[in-house]
Amino acid sequence: RNEGAGQTQFLIVSPRDSTRIEITPTATTEGGKVPNVPFNITLQRGQTYMVRSTGDLTGSRVRSIGTAICNPIALFTSSPLTTVGNCAPSNYLFEQIPPDAVLGTGYVIPKYPNTSGSIIRAMAVFPGTQIRLDGVNQGVPINTGQFREMAVDSFVYVNANKPFLLAHFTRGGSCTPTTPSVPTMTILPAVNQLQREASIYPPVGNLFQVTD
């Protein structure tokens, strides 16, 4: 997302040597790579590679490739000085992108208190993905790398016929003048990834309190 930012970017981190990676950007990059044309890089353990663009890099494909084994990689996305819904102020939005294997077909969107609603972006990772909002089809099915952007102002359920990625954005404080805030971005976990319980083990000798 590059609303008001002028730049979007993502960062690849390699935890192993000789990691071959294929990158297919959806916008012209700062280094001159053109949209929808894949290029390959090789990273060693601890090395990183950043892709930047003045366009929107949503839907770019990043994957580890190899003849015998595909090494794991970590992928982070960010947009500097970004506004959401034309609501000031701007903020630096940053998140880690999960692998396709952990995506799901259903997501619960919570109602954030003291906000003027949220914006969600549902991105397809498989062709023919039909996005639904509370059971209602949102346009025609979309293909890999395409997305549906929707404004929501209450608790909603978003699902599809195939696994997809969902990003949730909150607006800045100028749209909620009684509650100063900055915009945020969260990659939400799918319903099948949610847990009812969690175990917390504090360091010995330290006390802390958890509230919900």
Image: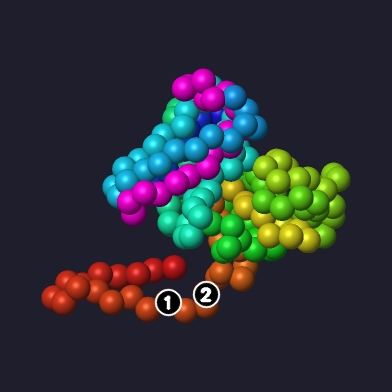
- Residue furthest left in the image: 205
Q: Is residue 58 visible?
A: yes
Span of residues in magenta: 14-33
> Residue at left 62%, top 28%?
35
Q: What is the x, y in percent for residue 210?
A: 35, 70
Do residues under tags 2 and 1 come within 8 Å of each other at their CB atoms? yes
Give the residue type at disc 1.
Ala
- Residue that badge 1 annotates: 198
Dividing the picture into quadrants, the one containing residue 72 is bottom left
Screen quadrant of the N terminus = top right
Overall secondary structure of the magenta section = loop
Give the residue type at disc 2.
Gln
Q: Secondary structure at mark 2?
A: loop
- Is residue 10 or residue 114 the one in the foreground? 10
Q: Give me the C-alpha separation between circle 2 and circle 1.
A: 7 Å
Tell whether 27 sits left or right of 137: left
- Residue that badge 2 annotates: 195
- Is residue 117 or residue 35 the one in the foreground? 35
Tell whether 121 sits left or right of 74: right
Tell whether 53 sits left or right of 92: right
Q: What is the x, y in percent for residue 66?
A: 49, 53
- Is residue 48 or residue 182 the one in the foreground? 48
Q: Mark 1 Cα within 10 Å, few/some/many (few <14, many 20+)?
A: few
Q: Which mark is residue 122?
A: none
